[in-house]
Image (cartoon, rainbow, N blue to C red):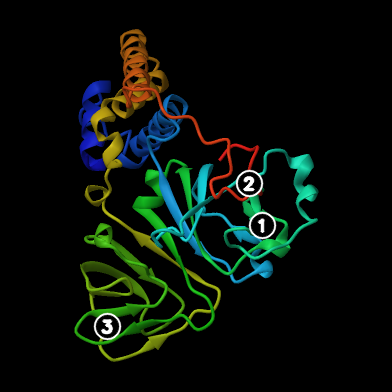
Amino acid sequence: MALDDLIARARLESGLRNNAYYDDAAIVRYLDAGGAELADIFTNANQHYVISTFDFATTGPSSAVVTLPADFQQGHSLEAYPDVPGQTRTIRYLPNWLNRNAFVGSVFPFSPGGYYPVYTFLDNKLRFYPPQAVPAAPFRLYYTPQWTSFQSLVTRAITLTTGDGVSDHGLGTWLIQAGAFTSLDLGGSFTVTGDPVLNGTYLIGEVNSATIVTATPHTAGDTDLTIPGAAMSLTRPYSSVSLPAVMAPWSEYLVVYAAIAINTDRQRGTGELERKLAALKVRIASTIGQRQEEPQQPPLTRDAWGDGWGGGGWY
Protein backbone atom coordinates (compact mmCIF):
# COMPACT_ATOMS: atom_id res chain seq x y z
CA MET A 1 0.00 0.00 0.00
CA ALA A 2 1.74 3.16 -1.25
CA LEU A 3 1.81 6.22 0.99
CA ASP A 4 0.13 8.46 -1.59
CA ASP A 5 -2.83 6.01 -1.65
CA LEU A 6 -3.10 6.23 2.15
CA ILE A 7 -3.10 10.03 1.92
CA ALA A 8 -5.95 9.98 -0.60
CA ARG A 9 -7.99 7.55 1.54
CA ALA A 10 -7.45 9.67 4.67
CA ARG A 11 -8.76 12.72 2.81
CA LEU A 12 -11.84 10.78 1.74
CA GLU A 13 -12.50 9.25 5.18
CA SER A 14 -12.22 12.63 6.93
CA GLY A 15 -14.23 14.55 4.34
CA LEU A 16 -11.30 16.76 3.36
CA ARG A 17 -11.48 15.99 -0.35
CA ASN A 18 -9.31 18.69 -1.94
CA ASN A 19 -9.03 20.89 1.14
CA ALA A 20 -5.68 22.62 0.60
CA TYR A 21 -5.35 23.65 4.26
CA TYR A 22 -4.14 20.15 5.09
CA ASP A 23 -1.26 19.45 2.74
CA ASP A 24 0.10 15.96 2.20
CA ALA A 25 2.91 16.48 4.73
CA ALA A 26 0.37 17.20 7.49
CA ILE A 27 -1.64 14.07 6.67
CA VAL A 28 1.54 11.98 6.60
CA ARG A 29 2.24 13.03 10.19
CA TYR A 30 -1.17 11.69 11.25
CA LEU A 31 -0.69 8.48 9.27
CA ASP A 32 2.72 8.10 10.86
CA ALA A 33 1.24 8.31 14.36
CA GLY A 34 -1.35 5.71 13.38
CA GLY A 35 1.37 3.45 12.03
CA ALA A 36 3.32 3.68 15.28
CA GLU A 37 0.21 2.69 17.24
CA LEU A 38 -0.49 -0.18 14.85
CA ALA A 39 3.08 -1.43 15.35
CA ASP A 40 2.51 -1.39 19.12
CA ILE A 41 -0.66 -3.46 18.67
CA PHE A 42 1.32 -6.01 16.66
CA THR A 43 4.04 -6.19 19.32
CA ASN A 44 1.64 -6.47 22.26
CA ALA A 45 -0.50 -9.14 20.56
CA ASN A 46 2.36 -11.28 19.23
CA GLN A 47 5.98 -10.40 19.91
CA HIS A 48 7.16 -12.71 17.12
CA TYR A 49 4.91 -11.42 14.34
CA VAL A 50 7.40 -8.85 13.02
CA ILE A 51 11.00 -10.01 13.35
CA SER A 52 14.24 -8.52 12.06
CA THR A 53 17.75 -9.96 12.20
CA PHE A 54 21.09 -8.33 12.99
CA ASP A 55 24.26 -10.14 11.98
CA PHE A 56 27.57 -9.24 13.59
CA ALA A 57 30.90 -10.89 14.28
CA THR A 58 33.14 -10.76 17.32
CA THR A 59 36.90 -11.06 17.38
CA GLY A 60 37.29 -12.02 21.04
CA PRO A 61 37.04 -10.36 24.48
CA SER A 62 37.48 -6.88 22.97
CA SER A 63 34.10 -7.35 21.26
CA ALA A 64 32.14 -7.94 24.48
CA VAL A 65 30.07 -4.77 23.86
CA VAL A 66 28.15 -4.52 20.57
CA THR A 67 26.09 -1.54 19.37
CA LEU A 68 22.51 -2.56 18.61
CA PRO A 69 20.67 -1.60 15.37
CA ALA A 70 19.04 1.83 15.44
CA ASP A 71 15.55 0.29 15.14
CA PHE A 72 16.03 -2.25 17.96
CA GLN A 73 13.02 -2.50 20.28
CA GLN A 74 12.94 -5.95 21.86
CA GLY A 75 15.36 -8.88 21.65
CA HIS A 76 14.24 -12.50 21.25
CA SER A 77 17.21 -14.78 20.80
CA LEU A 78 20.90 -14.83 19.89
CA GLU A 79 22.67 -17.51 17.85
CA ALA A 80 26.35 -18.24 17.33
CA TYR A 81 27.49 -19.66 13.98
CA PRO A 82 23.98 -19.11 12.52
CA ASP A 83 24.88 -20.30 9.01
CA VAL A 84 27.10 -23.25 9.95
CA PRO A 85 25.04 -26.47 10.01
CA GLY A 86 25.77 -28.55 13.06
CA GLN A 87 27.49 -25.69 14.90
CA THR A 88 24.63 -23.23 15.39
CA ARG A 89 24.07 -22.63 19.09
CA THR A 90 21.55 -20.51 21.03
CA ILE A 91 23.26 -18.22 23.55
CA ARG A 92 21.61 -17.85 26.94
CA TYR A 93 20.21 -14.52 28.09
CA LEU A 94 21.51 -13.22 31.44
CA PRO A 95 18.73 -14.38 33.81
CA ASN A 96 19.27 -11.66 36.40
CA TRP A 97 21.24 -8.41 36.13
CA LEU A 98 22.51 -8.82 39.70
CA ASN A 99 24.14 -12.11 38.71
CA ARG A 100 26.24 -10.64 35.91
CA ASN A 101 29.48 -11.01 37.89
CA ALA A 102 28.78 -14.64 38.79
CA PHE A 103 30.04 -15.72 35.37
CA VAL A 104 33.65 -14.57 35.75
CA GLY A 105 35.05 -17.60 37.55
CA SER A 106 35.55 -19.97 34.63
CA VAL A 107 36.80 -19.16 31.14
CA PHE A 108 37.06 -22.03 28.67
CA PRO A 109 37.06 -22.30 24.86
CA PHE A 110 33.77 -21.70 23.06
CA SER A 111 33.20 -25.34 22.09
CA PRO A 112 31.50 -28.50 23.38
CA GLY A 113 32.66 -28.97 26.95
CA GLY A 114 33.59 -25.30 27.20
CA TYR A 115 32.10 -22.24 28.83
CA TYR A 116 29.62 -20.07 26.92
CA PRO A 117 29.03 -16.38 27.63
CA VAL A 118 25.60 -15.02 28.42
CA TYR A 119 24.30 -11.70 27.15
CA THR A 120 22.00 -8.86 28.11
CA PHE A 121 20.86 -5.48 26.77
CA LEU A 122 21.98 -2.26 28.42
CA ASP A 123 21.26 1.14 26.90
CA ASN A 124 21.74 0.67 23.14
CA LYS A 125 24.30 -2.08 23.59
CA LEU A 126 24.39 -5.85 23.68
CA ARG A 127 26.85 -6.98 26.37
CA PHE A 128 28.44 -10.38 26.86
CA TYR A 129 29.36 -11.77 30.30
CA PRO A 130 32.06 -12.62 31.12
CA PRO A 131 33.99 -10.62 28.51
CA GLN A 132 36.89 -13.09 28.72
CA ALA A 133 34.71 -15.85 27.27
CA VAL A 134 33.63 -13.98 24.12
CA PRO A 135 34.75 -16.04 21.11
CA ALA A 136 35.82 -14.98 17.66
CA ALA A 137 32.59 -16.00 15.96
CA PRO A 138 29.63 -14.80 13.84
CA PHE A 139 26.33 -14.10 15.62
CA ARG A 140 22.73 -13.43 14.62
CA LEU A 141 20.29 -11.53 16.83
CA TYR A 142 16.54 -11.87 16.29
CA TYR A 143 14.61 -8.83 17.46
CA THR A 144 11.39 -6.83 17.15
CA PRO A 145 12.08 -3.57 15.28
CA GLN A 146 10.63 -0.19 16.09
CA TRP A 147 8.18 1.50 13.74
CA THR A 148 10.02 3.22 10.90
CA SER A 149 8.63 6.71 10.47
CA PHE A 150 7.18 7.61 7.09
CA GLN A 151 8.83 10.98 7.53
CA SER A 152 12.29 9.43 7.64
CA LEU A 153 11.51 7.47 4.47
CA VAL A 154 10.13 10.41 2.54
CA THR A 155 12.98 12.69 3.55
CA ARG A 156 16.26 11.38 4.88
CA ALA A 157 19.71 12.85 5.40
CA ILE A 158 22.88 11.58 3.76
CA THR A 159 25.72 12.24 6.15
CA LEU A 160 29.09 12.93 4.58
CA THR A 161 32.28 12.62 6.57
CA THR A 162 35.87 13.41 5.71
CA GLY A 163 36.80 11.45 2.60
CA ASP A 164 33.23 11.00 1.38
CA GLY A 165 32.44 12.90 -1.75
CA VAL A 166 29.91 13.78 -4.39
CA SER A 167 31.24 13.35 -7.91
CA ASP A 168 29.76 14.53 -11.17
CA HIS A 169 30.95 11.86 -13.63
CA GLY A 170 29.34 13.33 -16.73
CA LEU A 171 26.18 12.36 -18.61
CA GLY A 172 24.16 12.98 -15.46
CA THR A 173 25.74 10.17 -13.45
CA TRP A 174 26.63 10.98 -9.85
CA LEU A 175 28.73 9.04 -7.37
CA ILE A 176 27.70 9.68 -3.75
CA GLN A 177 29.82 7.48 -1.54
CA ALA A 178 27.55 7.73 1.51
CA GLY A 179 24.33 7.50 -0.47
CA ALA A 180 23.01 3.97 0.17
CA PHE A 181 20.42 4.52 -2.57
CA THR A 182 17.60 2.05 -3.29
CA SER A 183 14.72 1.88 -5.75
CA LEU A 184 12.68 3.92 -3.24
CA ASP A 185 14.72 6.97 -4.29
CA LEU A 186 13.53 6.93 -7.91
CA GLY A 187 11.72 10.18 -8.63
CA GLY A 188 13.23 11.81 -5.57
CA SER A 189 15.84 14.53 -5.47
CA PHE A 190 18.95 15.59 -3.62
CA THR A 191 20.44 19.00 -3.03
CA VAL A 192 24.12 19.95 -3.11
CA THR A 193 25.25 23.06 -1.23
CA GLY A 194 28.62 24.50 -0.40
CA ASP A 195 30.16 24.27 -3.87
CA PRO A 196 29.88 27.05 -6.49
CA VAL A 197 30.00 24.59 -9.39
CA LEU A 198 27.75 21.77 -8.19
CA ASN A 199 25.21 23.68 -6.09
CA GLY A 200 21.65 22.78 -7.03
CA THR A 201 18.81 20.30 -6.72
CA TYR A 202 19.00 17.14 -8.81
CA LEU A 203 16.15 14.79 -9.77
CA ILE A 204 16.96 11.07 -9.48
CA GLY A 205 15.98 9.26 -12.66
CA GLU A 206 17.87 5.98 -12.17
CA VAL A 207 19.58 4.11 -9.35
CA ASN A 208 22.56 2.30 -10.83
CA SER A 209 23.89 1.03 -7.49
CA ALA A 210 23.84 1.90 -3.80
CA THR A 211 26.20 4.82 -4.46
CA ILE A 212 25.60 5.79 -8.10
CA VAL A 213 22.51 7.58 -9.42
CA THR A 214 21.57 9.22 -12.69
CA ALA A 215 20.21 12.66 -11.93
CA THR A 216 19.25 15.84 -13.75
CA PRO A 217 19.72 18.75 -14.25
CA HIS A 218 23.33 18.06 -15.02
CA THR A 219 26.31 20.31 -14.41
CA ALA A 220 28.94 20.06 -17.12
CA GLY A 221 32.39 18.89 -16.20
CA ASP A 222 33.87 16.18 -14.03
CA THR A 223 34.07 17.89 -10.66
CA ASP A 224 34.44 16.20 -7.28
CA LEU A 225 33.03 17.67 -4.11
CA THR A 226 34.03 16.75 -0.56
CA ILE A 227 32.04 18.14 2.36
CA PRO A 228 33.67 17.07 5.66
CA GLY A 229 31.14 16.53 8.41
CA ALA A 230 28.23 17.89 6.34
CA ALA A 231 24.92 16.31 5.41
CA MET A 232 22.82 16.23 2.27
CA SER A 233 19.04 16.09 2.27
CA LEU A 234 17.45 13.40 0.09
CA THR A 235 13.75 13.73 -0.72
CA ARG A 236 11.77 10.71 -1.91
CA PRO A 237 8.36 10.86 -3.63
CA TYR A 238 5.32 9.66 -1.64
CA SER A 239 4.53 7.06 -4.30
CA SER A 240 7.83 5.27 -3.62
CA VAL A 241 7.14 4.75 0.11
CA SER A 242 4.92 1.87 1.18
CA LEU A 243 3.42 0.46 4.36
CA PRO A 244 5.37 -2.66 5.44
CA ALA A 245 3.92 -5.72 3.71
CA VAL A 246 3.02 -7.46 6.98
CA MET A 247 0.85 -4.45 7.96
CA ALA A 248 -0.68 -3.79 4.54
CA PRO A 249 -3.87 -5.81 5.23
CA TRP A 250 -4.58 -3.47 8.14
CA SER A 251 -3.96 -0.18 6.33
CA GLU A 252 -7.48 0.93 7.26
CA TYR A 253 -6.25 1.46 10.82
CA LEU A 254 -3.88 4.23 9.71
CA VAL A 255 -6.57 5.82 7.54
CA VAL A 256 -9.18 5.92 10.31
CA TYR A 257 -6.61 7.09 12.87
CA ALA A 258 -5.61 9.98 10.59
CA ALA A 259 -9.25 10.86 9.88
CA ILE A 260 -9.97 11.09 13.63
CA ALA A 261 -6.96 13.39 14.13
CA ILE A 262 -8.01 15.60 11.22
CA ASN A 263 -11.64 15.90 12.32
CA THR A 264 -10.61 16.56 15.92
CA ASP A 265 -8.43 19.39 14.68
CA ARG A 266 -11.36 20.72 12.62
CA GLN A 267 -13.69 20.42 15.65
CA ARG A 268 -15.90 17.92 13.89
CA GLY A 269 -17.53 14.85 15.40
CA THR A 270 -15.46 11.67 15.56
CA GLY A 271 -17.80 9.23 17.34
CA GLU A 272 -18.39 6.95 14.36
CA LEU A 273 -14.72 6.93 13.42
CA GLU A 274 -13.66 6.13 17.00
CA ARG A 275 -16.04 3.16 17.12
CA LYS A 276 -14.60 1.96 13.82
CA LEU A 277 -11.05 2.30 15.14
CA ALA A 278 -11.90 0.41 18.34
CA ALA A 279 -13.42 -2.45 16.33
CA LEU A 280 -10.33 -2.59 14.11
CA LYS A 281 -8.06 -2.70 17.17
CA VAL A 282 -9.92 -5.72 18.59
CA ARG A 283 -9.90 -7.56 15.24
CA ILE A 284 -6.18 -6.92 14.67
CA ALA A 285 -5.12 -8.02 18.14
CA SER A 286 -7.29 -11.14 17.98
CA THR A 287 -6.09 -12.18 14.52
CA ILE A 288 -2.41 -11.57 15.18
CA GLY A 289 -2.48 -13.21 18.59
CA GLN A 290 -3.84 -16.44 17.08
CA ARG A 291 -1.23 -16.80 14.35
CA GLN A 292 -0.19 -20.26 15.56
CA GLU A 293 -3.02 -22.72 16.21
CA GLU A 294 -1.30 -25.32 18.38
CA PRO A 295 0.43 -24.45 21.68
CA GLN A 296 4.03 -23.39 21.31
CA GLN A 297 6.72 -25.71 22.65
CA PRO A 298 8.30 -24.36 25.85
CA PRO A 299 12.03 -23.66 25.69
CA LEU A 300 14.45 -26.34 26.88
CA THR A 301 15.48 -26.26 30.54
CA ARG A 302 18.41 -28.63 30.13
CA ASP A 303 21.86 -28.14 28.69
CA ALA A 304 21.55 -28.42 24.91
CA TRP A 305 25.09 -29.79 24.62
CA GLY A 306 24.84 -32.17 27.56
CA ASP A 307 28.05 -31.00 29.19
CA GLY A 308 26.61 -29.50 32.36
CA TRP A 309 27.57 -25.88 31.79
CA GLY A 310 24.31 -24.59 30.35
CA GLY A 311 21.77 -26.36 32.55
CA GLY A 312 19.18 -24.81 34.82
CA GLY A 313 18.32 -21.71 32.79
CA TRP A 314 15.85 -20.94 30.03
CA TYR A 315 17.18 -20.98 26.46
Looking at the picture, how far across and down is residue 270, in whole percent?
A: 36, 12
Count how many numbered circles sit on residues in the image.
Answer: 3
Mark 3: few, some, or many residues within 10 Å (few <14, many ≥20)? some
Q: Secondary structure at mark 1?
A: loop
Looking at the picture, how far across and down is residue 167, in whole percent?
A: 35, 84
Looking at the picture, how far across and down is residue 258, in whole percent?
A: 35, 27
Contact between marks 1 and 2 (CB within 8 A): the answer is no
Height in image: 28 above or below 255? below
How many angstroms separate mark 2 from mark 3 (CA)?
63 Å
Residue 45 lies in quadrant: top left
Q: Is residue 156 left or right of residue 276?
A: right
Q: Which residue is mark 2?
A: 310
How many angstroms separate mark 1 from mark 2 (CA)?
8 Å
Q: Residue at x 38, y 39 (%)?
A: 50
Q: Which residue is mark 3?
A: 219
Contact between marks 2 and 3 (CB within 8 A): the answer is no
Q: Nearer the viewer, residue 253 or 305?
A: 305
- State which mark lies toward you, 1 or 3: 1
Earlier along the polypeptide chain: callout 1 or callout 3? 1
- State which mark lies toward you, 2 or 3: 2
Q: Nearer the viewer, residue 219 or 52?
A: 52
How many angstroms separate mark 1 from mark 3 (CA)?
61 Å
Q: Secondary structure at mark 3?
A: loop
Earlier along the polypeptide chain: callout 2 or callout 3? 3
Residue 172 lies in quadrant: bottom left
Where does the C terminus fall, quadrant-wise? top right
Q: Is residue 164 left or right of residue 169?
A: right
Q: At label 2, which amino acid type do we have? A: Gly
On residue 115, the disc is 1
Q: Residue at x 34, y 35 (%)?
A: 27
